[in-house]
Image: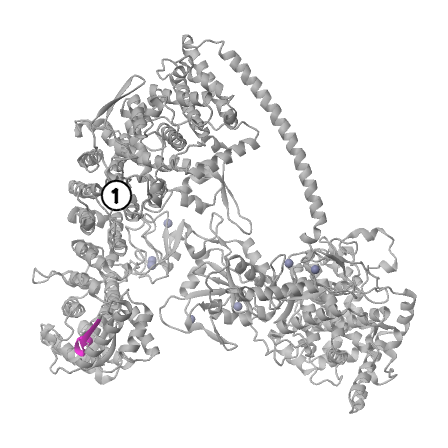
């Protein structure tokens, strides 16, 4: 800032200070200055200069005034004196990761920001991670939010200097006074301007001296119009271009409003008209447009700027913050007016987005950071609550940008909540608010009725229910009398609301016709779901003390009694059954209206249980002296249960889906604890209080089964009979539940933990389950906790997941006895699944299949009478009737399900009697067994039961029947002991027992017979299976040689005598001959067999060629332009190779061609088929295994290689290494001379190898030739297809089969594929031979044979030229331009090229010749020796030693090594001498291994000669391995020996190799030199804890943009680069296409494929060829062995090394493309995801 300006600022502040009351002075200044700076030009939004002007002319003087000195100085002083806040208060952006602690957070709304979390104790607790929806803030430092560890290290008290809460004294008096003065004026100005609604006038005190005729036309954001609407409207109305319209629209969406036109009033009015009419035209609703005078606009802009300024200032010091809070809460002078902050709150809904955000942020960083002011603010907030909610509901913005969203910050604070209830009765306020909003839905009888509700509005109303939940979330520990009163008042209000729900939305059964319109039911249920936790929390609050509970119960009871909205239609009548009389009012669920909503009845049931639990039940009579009307209490819940039963019995079919859904939710885990469960409790209450016979009769009445059981009437109507049966089943089930379900604290003596345990046991009885499935199936509490973790270890064992799938919990054996097949929370399907599973299990254990009721816990005294229902006449009658019908009638009148339930009930009765007998010994009044034996009409219940065994359709229940009979015996014995006289006649039992024994023996015999039978069948089956596999082996394996005798891995031939012909040497005169097996293969398409022959139709192997960077030593290297690049030499960094893989499936070439054409034709018509495979690039899916392929490899039979060893020996004497080199060079020279007219023999003459004894041009032929192999047309055609594919894909060029680079690419892909396979085998620690999968081995062999045969389809001249060029790398001066340094050549690629090209040298003009086997053997031998020597030199030049190695200076090998090295030192510049021999040997041994192993694989595939057995074994030492490999390759184990043997020939070569200046250059900059062994690539190391990654992501900044938009940090797993994916900012143009950061990165990093971890989403993305990709589970699992895509569950995640390894293998084995193709095939995507934009 310039000196002059600073002085001006200083002067200004002096002026203000002198004027004392600065208000009017300041206003005058602002009135004058603001319009001069803001809104002076056409452009809206502040330019940089304007921003600076704001600083110098407006803010700077204010700060000068505030500090009374240079603000810089003042600020420094201030910061010395005070600490920063101990609350973090960081406001979350949308998408930011937040953490909460399940162990310590008071409720799940308490969250930490990433930084605080990482330095808090909760890191090691059971935390959860979530993605913020924006707007909340970090609760670090809030003592009330956390049970332990409220502060992170940074915000710990004392961490940042001491701070006295509430002490303003830390500001010196003057500063504070000035601050107060300034804030008062400025904040009032800010509020005035933000809430100012006059567009064209200003407040009097801001009136400008001159009013210009400049206006703005301002367009506001709404949620009604789409982006496109707005853009279109703007283009039409204000005539701006598309780009400008887009910018406007973006900013309108972001900020909430934007000036779209500046001009005279008239011009703006015209624009406004145009916008409104245009927008109305397209969407029926006009856009909101206002015209603002430029001065108004200016002041509003500055007010907003001040908002941000305040945020800064209050962060300067606590003192300022407190002063600001005081100012904002200060009561206005006019009592009619609100304080400033309330004024802002109350206009919140009128403000536009941008303004709201600033206001909210200001509130958060000031008022909510100070405990005392937070309290005052909370009271203001509560005062305005109703108004705020109403505004919000009429507003159309999202909740997160409404001031009402702050409620969570206030209501969840326990002390605040208590005070708000105590002082502001906030519970009542909230309920009154919601009632007022819902009042329009009340019908005549004061019940809600949501027919035709406005769902959008309704959705907003529900937000108020959240507040109700928040306010109740922490139950107070201290209760004052006032709190008690206020709470009760709130509770009464709540009951008032429930009263409107009681009986709402009645349904009536539809007769005849199906309903026409499905009634709305979602609204009612969504309120129920919203209230679920609130209901249980109200109950919980009531239990705070006995008084409150009793009072609450009384209120609830009275409310229920005052509900008169479901009246009976008729008067009471008497009914009779078993000599009992019931007097009740008739009512039929099937005819009269019935409602599923009974919150008051259910609340009452809930409170009743609490009464029992606390013992307060004994004092109930003091509160409700009149007793209670049980029949009335139970009536409605019973109706509801009957409704559910009738729906299950399909009696309500005509009422449509809405009713089915309601009944479903009624019992679903989301609702049941406050619906179905409470209804059951109410029935249990009734059963405990009513006369049991009356209770039973009432049930029968309501189930409309009274007549059915009272008279023996049989309906002829089949439909009706079925209904009655279903109803009976349902009723019996209900009785089982009422009598047996006691797992509720208060009903019996169980803990909450017991309850959860029982739920979990029953879930696991269905099947073993994943943690997340269990969580979903359990009810959660208001803190979203299910309590699962506390119990799961006790009842289940965890089974870890494999590399896919997820971990599951398996029920412990000892818990199985708890299983109750009629568990009341089972759905119909769960019930039958569980029953099946348990029966199956018991069968496997060879035990009987009875599933008897488990031992139930004892009822609490208040409920103890329930058991009398079991013992009552009416129930015995019902049971008897069912059994009698089963025994006496056939079908129709009974079902197996009925019998099952009856047996269960009898079992319950017997268990009860047994328990009582065991406990009391004597005088047990409960006499179920005696009643069951009582004979009526000649037969007892027991007699029917015995006969039941003989009813054939009940075979499946036999075990259960037997169990029941045994129970009768046990109970009888117990009774006899206690009172022998009560025993029944013994004789009836004896035969019974013997029958049982016989029964048992019989069953055992049968079981054994069945077992034998099963075993026999199993044996047959497995034999058949074997045969099938044998005969269809091709289908399973489809390898060319499934374990043929020629397979190297088969050790059989070792048994025969070891002759030379079987020697395991692959080259040279001692070469073995290999086994030429005839191969007969089956085509997977036509299923016909064919032998692989050179002269018949080609058989082809599916194959996929792809570029690969898996071996690169230089990741991310920019790959050469492939249009012109000649891939003669592979650089040793292997930056990009060409890999050819195969799934190993074989077809006839014509079959494949037909298939391929068909695929092309059909997929062209398929939607998005191009996503799955790229037709243009010849891609298709393997017809059998659906692997991605893009070419085929023709199968070429091996040529016989029989050597005449005598001849070979002879030839060897003549054809020494130097001689061989001579004749080869002579041949090259000759060929060159023939092809070129110009004679360059003089140049050749300079070559030392031509100096003496020049060999003849044709002498090469004299060592043996033969005619070249001939292949059928078909094979030749396929050779071209395959070679072209390697060329096209490897070089990314258009196919051109005549390009001279075609053969090079064939050899290169052969070499690279071998290297990749060698790398993989080594990485996995597998032996070199015999451990490849069949498909890999088949593919590799075919590939090598193809590469060898490919030569024949190319021009021999081209191949000869390539050979010359390749050889020039080793024999320099072959008259080839720019020979490369040997450090720049990958010698294995060179070896393959030389070996496969050399036969071309034998070509004689018109005669097709190739070397004889003997010639080949020597060619291979000498080429390998030459290349190996070059490689040894490479290694010696480049390698380093591992430190700390020791060795001794002994032996021949060391000597020769030292000798060679000395030679190298002599001829190389920059190579340091004096390296011990053992060290050199070690370097070479380690360095050469990769090369030799590759060579071994190559020659083995080329010649088919079996390798030494040790190479197929894992248990071999490194030395042993090398030795065997050398012997197979006919190399001396001591490789230095080669240099000795060929000293004369090699020494000049050494000089040339090392003398190349490139070598010295490379040696000086050793960093770029490739060392041997090459390093093996790994995926980047990932942290064990996922939150570390999230932390990284949090600190990630997009390299290209600075805006605060949410970014998607994405980690490249190959190189560790963090990219900004899926974002416009980081798009790049690759090959004239715009692609996202990941797609662009993978071009060079992974040669087209990529593997990325999307960090926020916790998902791996596989990418291939820019346009394709798929998601793959991240290798992170939670403690339950489950992945968590999108972090939906938010459990802590840990790296799974196994899964990460699987990803690694996917990459190394080149299966990424395949995986993508497979996933796309599985998920037939309906929409195309734009992978390239990632
Ligand atoms: Zn924080
Ligand atoms: Zn913190
Ligand atoms: Zn914790
Ligand atoms: Zn075929
Ligand atoms: Zn396949
Ligand atoms: Zn990368
Ligand atoms: Zn970016």
Nearest to the observer: residue 750 or residue 1154: 1154
Quadrant in which ligand 2 is drawn: bottom left
Q: Is residue 1477 visible?
A: no
Stretch of the chain drawn in magenta: 289-297
Q: Give the quadrant of residue 408.
A: bottom left
Residue 40 magenta: no
1370 displayed left or right of 556? right
- List the residue tagged with mark 1: 505
Local packing at callout 1 (Cα closer than 10 Å; few below 14, some 14-19, many 20+) is many
Q: Nearer the viewer, residue 1665 or 441?
A: 441
Residue 1, picture quadrant: bottom left
Indicate the position of residue 517 as horizontal and vertical percent values. Answer: 31, 48
Q: Mark 1: which secondary structure?
A: loop
* Whether residue 552 is situated above or below residue 1632 in the rendered picture: above
Residue 354 in percent (x, y) is at 26, 68
Measured from the top left, where is residue 743 in percent x and y? 36, 32
Task: Look at the numbered disc 1 and say if its residue's Cβ is closer than 8 Å to ligand 3.
Answer: no
**Does residue 1258 appear in this view?**
yes
In-front residue for pair 814/1485: 814
Compared to residue 1645, the image places residue 1182 above or below, namely above
Determine whether, in the image, residue 1376 is placed left or right of residue 233: right
Residue pictured at 13% horizontal, 61% vertical: 339
Residue 985, compared with residue 909, is above or below; it is above
């Amino acid at each position: 800032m310039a000196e002059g300006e600073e002085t001006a600022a200083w002067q200004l502040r002096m002026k203000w200070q002198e004027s004392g009351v600065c208000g009017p002075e300041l206003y005058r200044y602002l009135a004058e200055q603001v319009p001069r700076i803001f809104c002076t030009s056409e452009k809206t939004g502040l330019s940089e200069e304007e921003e600076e002007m704001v600083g110098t002319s407006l803010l700077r003087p204010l700060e000068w005034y505030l500090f009374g000195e240079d603000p810089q100085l003042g600020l420094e002083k201030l910061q010395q004196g005070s600490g920063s806040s101990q609350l973090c208060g960081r406001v979350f952006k949308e998408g930011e990761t937040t953490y909460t602690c399940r162990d310590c957070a008071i409720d799940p709304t308490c969250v930490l920001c990433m930084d605080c979390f990482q330095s808090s104790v909760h890191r090691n607790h059971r935390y959860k991670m979530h993605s913020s929806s924006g707007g909340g803030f970090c609760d670090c430092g809030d003592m009330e939010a956390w049970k332990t560890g409220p502060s992170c290290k940074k915000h710990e008290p004392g961490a940042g200097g001491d701070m006295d809460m509430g002490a303003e004294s830390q500001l010196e008096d003057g500063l504070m006074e000035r601050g107060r003065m300034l804030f008062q004026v400025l904040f009032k100005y800010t509020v005035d301007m933000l809430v100012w609604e006059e567009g064209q006038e200003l407040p009097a005190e801001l009136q400008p001296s001159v009013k210009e005729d400049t206006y703005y036309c301002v367009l506001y954001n709404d949620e009604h119009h789409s982006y496109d609407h707005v853009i279109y409207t703007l283009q039409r109305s204000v005539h701006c271009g598309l780009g400008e319209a887009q910018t406007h629209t973006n900013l309108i969406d972001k900020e909430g409003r934007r000036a779209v036109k500046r001009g005279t009033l008239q011009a703006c009015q015209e624009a406004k008209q145009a916008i409104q009419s245009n927008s109305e035209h397209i969407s029926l609703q006009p856009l909101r447009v206002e015209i603002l005078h430029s001065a108004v606009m200016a002041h509003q802009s500055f007010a907003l700027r001040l908002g941000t300024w305040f945020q800064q200032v209050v962060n300067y010091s606590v003192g300022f913050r407190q002063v600001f809070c005081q100012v904002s809460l200060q009561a206005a002078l006019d009592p009619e007016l609100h304080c400033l902050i309330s004024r802002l709150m109350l206009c919140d809904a009128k403000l536009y987005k941008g303004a709201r955000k600033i206001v909210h942020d200001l509130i958060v960083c000031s008022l909510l950071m100070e405990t005392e002011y937070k309290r005052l603010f909370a009271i203001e907030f509560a005062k305005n609550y109703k108004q705020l909610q109403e505004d919000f509901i009429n507003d159309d913005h999202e909740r997160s940008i409404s001031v009402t969203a702050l409620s969570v910050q206030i209501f969840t604070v326990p002390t605040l909540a208590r005070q708000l209830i105590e002082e502001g009765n906030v519970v009542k306020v909230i309920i009154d608010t919601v009632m007022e909003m819902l009042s329009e839905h009340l019908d005549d009888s004061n019940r809600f009725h949501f027919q035709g509700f406005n769902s959008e509005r309704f959705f907003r109303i529900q937000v108020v229910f959240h507040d109700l939940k928040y306010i109740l979330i922490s139950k107070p520990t201290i209760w004052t009398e006032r709190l008690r009163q206020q709470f009760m008042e709130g509770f009464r209000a709540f009951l008032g609301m429930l009263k409107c729900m009681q009986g709402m939305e009645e349904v009536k059964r539809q007769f005849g016709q199906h309903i026409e319109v499905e009634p709305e039911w979602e609204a009612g249920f969504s309120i129920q779901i919203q209230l679920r936790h609130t209901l249980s929390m109200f109950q919980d609050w009531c239990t705070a003390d006995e008084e409150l509970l009793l009072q609450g119960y009384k209120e609830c009871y009275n409310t229920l009694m005052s509900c008169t909205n479901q009246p009976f239609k008729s008067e009471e009548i008497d009914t009779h059954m078993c000599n009992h009389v019931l007097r009740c009012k008739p009512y039929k669920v099937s005819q009269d209206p019935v409602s599923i909503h009974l919150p008051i009845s259910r609340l009452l049931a809930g409170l009743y249980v609490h009464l029992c639990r606390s013992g307060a039940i004994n004092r109930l009579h003091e509160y409700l002296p009149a007793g209670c009307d049980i029949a009335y209490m139970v009536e409605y819940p019973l109706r509801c249960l009957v409704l559910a039963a009738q729906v299950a019995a399909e009696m309500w079919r005509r009422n449509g889906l809405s009713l089915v859904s309601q009944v479903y939710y009624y019992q679903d885990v989301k609702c049941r604890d406050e619906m179905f469960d409470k209804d059951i409790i109410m029935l249990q209450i009734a059963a405990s209080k009513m006369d049991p016979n009356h209770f039973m009769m009432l049930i029968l009445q309501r189930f409309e089964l009274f007549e059915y059981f009272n008279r023996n009437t049989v309906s002829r109507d089949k439909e009706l009979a079925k209904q009655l049966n279903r109803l009976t089943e349902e009723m019996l089930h209900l009785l089982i539940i009422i009598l047996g379900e006691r797992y509720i604290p208060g009903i019996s003596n169980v803990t909450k933990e017991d309850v959860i345990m029982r739920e979990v046991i029953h879930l696991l009885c269905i099947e073993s389950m994943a943690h997340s499935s269990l969580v979903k199936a359990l009810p959660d509490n208001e803190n979203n906790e299910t309590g699962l973790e506390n119990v799961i270890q006790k009842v289940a064992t965890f089974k870890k997941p494999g590399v896919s799938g997820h971990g599951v919990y398996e029920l412990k054996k000892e818990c199985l006895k708890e299983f109750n097949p009629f568990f009341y929370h089972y759905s119909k399907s769960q019930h039958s699944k569980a029953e099946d599973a348990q029966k199956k299990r018991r069968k496997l254990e060879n035990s009987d299949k009875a599933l008897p009721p488990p031992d139930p816990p004892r009822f609490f005294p208040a409920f103890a009478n329930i058991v009398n229902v079991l013992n009552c006449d009416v129930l015995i009658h019902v049971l008897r009737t069912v059994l009698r019908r089963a025994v006496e009638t056939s079908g129709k009148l009974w079902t197996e399900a009925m019998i099952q339930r009856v047996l269960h009930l009898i079992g319950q009765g017997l268990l009860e009697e047994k328990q009582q007998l065991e406990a009391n010994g004597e005088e047990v009044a409960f006499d179920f067994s005696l009643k069951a034996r009582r004979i009526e009409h000649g037969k007892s219940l027991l007699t029917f039961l015995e006969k039941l065994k003989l009813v054939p359709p009940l075979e499946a229940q036999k075990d259960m029947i037997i169990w029941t009979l045994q129970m009768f015996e046990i109970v009888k014995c117990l009774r006899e002991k206690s009172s022998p006289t009560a025993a029944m006649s013994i004789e009836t039992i004896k035969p019974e027992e013997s029958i049982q024994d016989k029964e048992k023996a019989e069953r055992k015999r049968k079981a054994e017979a069945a077992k034998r039978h099963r075993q026999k069948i199993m044996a047959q089956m497995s034999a058949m299976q074997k045969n099938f596999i044998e005969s269809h082996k091709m289908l399973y394996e489809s390898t060319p040689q499934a374990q043929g005798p020629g397979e190297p891995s088969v050790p059989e031939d070792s048994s025969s005598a070891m002759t030379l012909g079987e020697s395991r040497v692959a080259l040279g005169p001692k070469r073995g001959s290999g086994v030429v097996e005839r191969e007969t293969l089956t085509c997977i398409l036509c299923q016909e067999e064919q032998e692989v022959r050179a002269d018949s139709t080609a058989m082809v192997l599916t194959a996929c060629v792809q570029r690969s960077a898996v071996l690169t030593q230089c990741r991310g290297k920019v790959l050469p332009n492939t249009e012109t690049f000649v891939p003669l030499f592979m650089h040793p960094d292997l930056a990009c190779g060409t890999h050819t893989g195969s799934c190993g499936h074989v077809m006839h070439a014509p079959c494949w061609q037909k298939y391929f054409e068909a695929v092309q034709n059909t997929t062209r018509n398929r939607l998005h088929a191009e996503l799955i495979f790229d037709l243009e690039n010849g891609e298709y899916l393997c017809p059998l295994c659906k692997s991605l392929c893009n070419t085929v490899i023709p199968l070429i039979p091996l040529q016989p290689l029989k050597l005449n060893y005598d001849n070979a020996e002879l030839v060897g004497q003549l054809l020494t290494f130097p001689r061989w080199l001579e004749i080869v060079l002579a041949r090259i020279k000759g060929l060159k001379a023939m092809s070129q007219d110009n004679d360059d023999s003089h140049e050749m003459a300079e070559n030392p190898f031509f100096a003496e004894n020049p060999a003849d041009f044709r002498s090469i032929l004299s060592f043996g030739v033969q005619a070249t192999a001939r292949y059928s047309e078909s094979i030749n055609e396929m050779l071209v297809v395959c070679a072209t594919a390697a060329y096209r894909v490897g070089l990314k060029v258009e196919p051109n089969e005549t390009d001279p680079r075609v053969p090079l690419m064939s050899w290169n892909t052969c070499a690279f594929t071998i290297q990749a396979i060698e790398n993989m085998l080594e990485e996995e620690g597998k032996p070199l031979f015999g451990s490849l999968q069949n498909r890999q081995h088949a593919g590799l062999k075919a590939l090598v044979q193809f590469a060898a045969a490919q030569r024949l389809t190319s021009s021999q001249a081209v191949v000869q030229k390539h050979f010359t060029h390749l050889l020039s790398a080793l024999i320099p001066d072959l008259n080839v331009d720019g020979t490369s340094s040997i450090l720049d050549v990958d010698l294995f690629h060179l070896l393959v090229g030389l070996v496969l090209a050399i036969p071309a040298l034998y070509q004689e003009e018109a005669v097709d010749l190739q070397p004889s086997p003997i010639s080949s053997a020597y060619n291979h031998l000498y080429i390998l020796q030459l290349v190996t020597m070059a490689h040894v030199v490479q290694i010696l030049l480049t390698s380093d030693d591992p430190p700390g190695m020791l060795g001794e200076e002994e032996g021949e090998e060391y000597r020769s090594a030292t000798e060679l090295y000395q030679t190298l030192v002599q001829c190389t510049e920059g190579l340091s001498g004096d390296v011990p021999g053992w060290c050199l040997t070690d370097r070479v041994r380690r360095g050469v291994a990769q090369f030799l192993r590759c060579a071994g694989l190559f020659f083995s595939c080329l010649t088919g000669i079996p390798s030494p057995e040790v190479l197929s074994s894992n248990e071999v030492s490194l030395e042993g391995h090398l030795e065997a490999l050398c012997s197979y390759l006919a190399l001396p184990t001591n490789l230095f020996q080669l240099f000795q043997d060929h000293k004369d020939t090699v020494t000049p070569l050494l000089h040339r190799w090392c003398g190349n200046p490139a070598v010295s250059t490379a040696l000086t900059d050793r960093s770029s030199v490739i060392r041997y062994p090459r390093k093996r690539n790994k995926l980047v190391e990932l942290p064990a804890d996922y939150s570390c990654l999230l932390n990284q992501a949090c600190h990630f900044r997009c390299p290209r943009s600075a805006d605060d938009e949410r970014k998607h940090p994405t980690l490249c797993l190959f190189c560790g680069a963090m990219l900004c994916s899926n974002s416009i900012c980081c798009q790049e143009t690759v090959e004239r296409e715009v692609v996202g950061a990941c797609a662009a990165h993978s071009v060079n990093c992974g040669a087209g494929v990529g593997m990325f971890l999307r960090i926020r989403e916790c998902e791996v993305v596989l990418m291939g060829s820019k346009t394709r990709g798929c998601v793959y589970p991240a290798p992170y699992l939670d403690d339950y062995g489950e992945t968590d895509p999108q972090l939906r569950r938010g459990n802590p995640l840990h790296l799974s090394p196994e899964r990460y390894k699987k990803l690694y293998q996917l990459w190394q084995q080149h299966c990424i493309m395949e995986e993508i193709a497979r996933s796309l095939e599985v998920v037939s995507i309906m929409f195309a995801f734009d992978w390239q934009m990632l």
